Amino acid sequence: MEKQKTIDVLNTLITINNDRIEGYETATKETEEQDLKTLFAHLSATSKKCITELKLEVTKLGGTPAEGTLASGKFFRVWMDVKAALTGKDRKAILNSCEYGEDVAKYTYEKALKNDAENLSAEQETMIKVQHSLLLANHDKVKSMRDALVTA
């Protein structure tokens, strides 16, 4: 296990969570619907919890926790802004954008678990699996809210 590679993996997960927080701050501004604002606050809180745990691990390894966002996160926020403007802050469009962002986060965690397991301690791998489960639950909540609009 190479310490720098471990730090890099953990920092990638920090940045994807930073992306989620910024994305949901954008989504909150794009809707007037209180249930969506509540959902987005919950999704942001999940990422804040994940970031706290990830930063602690990076610090334990002697690294510097990441502060920024990924280019994909910036793309997600810009895409959400454009989509919301074009659709008049349409609930389904906002939820579609959020689900896209959740897919990116889910993929990033899956990639870390699949491709970088040899760079993670058993405790780090367990932490990442637990966080991945939280993100999957968040993804499924967004998807179910979006799908409910189709059947309503």
Image (tube, rainbow, N blue to C red):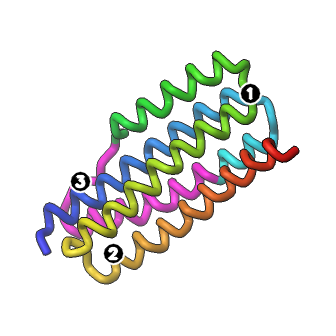
Q: Position of residue 105 (x, y in %)?
A: 45, 52
Which amino acid is tagged 2? Gln
Q: Which quadrant of the figure contains the C terminus? A: top right
Q: Position of residue 141 (x, y in %)?
A: 68, 56
Residue occupied by mark 3: 64
Q: Position of residue 94 (x, y in %)?
A: 66, 34
Image point (80%, 49%), residue name: 148
Question: Which span is picked out in magenta?
Answer: 43-67
Q: Residues within 10 Å of mark 2 (few under 14, many from 20)?
A: some
Q: Is residue 142 above or below residue 79?
A: below
Residue 124: give its label: 2
User: Callout 3: helix, strand or loop?
Assistant: loop
Which amino acid is tagged 1? Asp
Q: CA distance from mark 3 to mark 2?
A: 17 Å
Image point (51%, 26%), residue name: 79
Q: Which quadrant of the figure contains the N terminus? A: bottom left
